[in-house]
Amino acid sequence: MEFAELIRTPRVDNVVLHRPFYPAVEGTLCLTGHHLILSSRQDNTEELWLLHSNIDAIDKRFVGPLGTIIIKCKDFRIIQLDIPGMEECLNIASSIEALSTLDSITLMYPFFYRPMFEVIEDGWHSFLPEQEFEFYSSATSEWRLSYVNKEFAVCPSYSPIVIVPKSIDDEALRKVATFRHGGRFPVLSYYHKKNGMVIMRSGQPLTGTNGRRCKEDEKLINATLRAGKRGYIIDTRSLTVAQQARAKGGGFEQEAHYPQWRRIHKSIERYHILQESLIKLVEACNDQTHNMDRWLSKLEASNWLTHIKEILTTACLAAQCIDREGASILIHGTEGTDSTLQVTSLAQIILEPRSRTIRGFEALIEREWLQAGHPFQQRCAQSAYCNSRQKWESPVFLLFLDCVWQILRQFPCSFEFNENFLIMLFEHAYASQFGTFLGNNESERCKLKLQQKTMSLWSWVNRPSELSKFTSPLFEANNLVIWPSVAPQSLHLWEGIFLRWNRSSKYLDEAYEEMVNIIEHNKELQAKVNILRRQLAELETEDGMQESP
């Protein structure tokens, strides 16, 4: 298919652009295969380059010969184009609709993007499972790399290499895979070096109504327990939902078969419930009536902060089991690709200082989201504005980033990255020139040959010129476990995401710059103090030598 077939009118003059925080500007609108571009001949006017994949929905209005297209973006921005001529307006609108809903992944911009920057690091090879295993292998010899999923034969949503207990062979893993949803047998998610406890994750066991069991599965998860120790299974579904799953062939671990494990149910919502919550929240944030009761009522009705609280509470529970109880845990819901990954990731941010650094957080996203099979292509296909609802869209990753922001806000000095880093990841998960978040799992990415045909997001982010934008000036390495408060008073609306197009951040940006200047000045003064102290010490030494006979 040629993009030209979808572009009915490639160019229109005298189009007026309205967008947040900029004055209205008149210019020429151009449509390419991947971008909507508005260019003005006025001096000092920034061009608009909008990826079609960032467009969530469009509305059309007509007043006489003038047509208006309102573009609603996946990053929650709303842009208005005033186009002279009804025919041109209709043609532009239908072209945008066609180009923003391409079915084929290989027609998306990452396959056509060519970087204008020097590639210092190949991000596709920055965070491989072998490197992660090296990090753990220095502390334990009880785990091994398994290549049982080579060619994705055992589990299509896992990566080809996984970390499993050394005492369990590949044949046993194949049997366990037939007993777990989607073939997602228990694998290592995190090893706590302080006490040797581990977090494992998997899909639900396929016990069904007959109470089916799998001795290899029981042996596998028991292999993670120390003598005389108990473990915890954290099921991210309510007990009712878990029991209902048995009728569909799923289920949960029976206590009779897993006597050393205590099962805890922590209900975390997913799918359409989260999507509807996001729609209500964005609608509330865009409500310009300025009525306090209405705003608070809509914010509460969205339930967004309730979902944040549920996820953070479960992550704190998981971290508590590991660090305070000295117990290993297995986490799963139904598939093990959504709420499971939210909890395993956040528990590591609480427990592991490395996950609070920029590279450590990138490694966490690779390991716990991309390699672990979170279906980004499905979940991030649409955002808060789209009218046509599919059943698999859900802001699971955005909720995770919001939870990270909540912890960052409570512990600003413990994170090497700043809020802009999290916002950037949200934007690229929904629309990007990079191939990192394309596809639903490693198997799909392999078939699409993303490593050969697209650029990794990490290749761009990890350049010194970009890293400086995402580095927090407040960061002081903290090797302790951090315990976030999940009290309702401690949880805030993430204004940097949900209100950034509704009110200017000019004064906040200026305050941030001033803070950075103060910190830099403080460092310079501290360096001068250190020099003067050394000089004073040298002078005192000399005086002492002169006074001695």
Image (cartoon, rainbow, N blue to C red):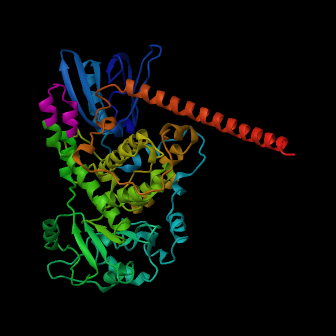
Query: Which residue is painted at 75% across and 40% down in the image?
Result: 540
Give the camera-side residue of 243 and 378.
243
Give the camera-side residue of 24 and 192.
192
Query: Which residue is painted at 18% across and 74% down in the image?
Result: 249
Query: Which residue is painted at 19% across and 20% down in the image?
Result: 62
Looking at the image, which residue sits at the far right?
549
Q: Is residue 483 above or below residue 102?
A: below
Q: Residue 440 location, x and y as percent?
A: 35, 57
Residue 362 is at least partly visible in this image: yes
Q: Is residue 64 magenta?
A: no
104 sits to left or right of 279: right
Q: Residue 445 location, x and y as percent?
A: 42, 58
Secondary structure mostly seen in magenta is: helix
Q: Residue 397 location, x and y as percent?
A: 32, 50
Query: Which residue is painted at 31% across and 58% down in the image?
Result: 316
Q: Is residue 458 above or below residue 255?
A: above
| Residues drawn in magenta | 281-296
Give the camera-side residue of 403 and 447.
403
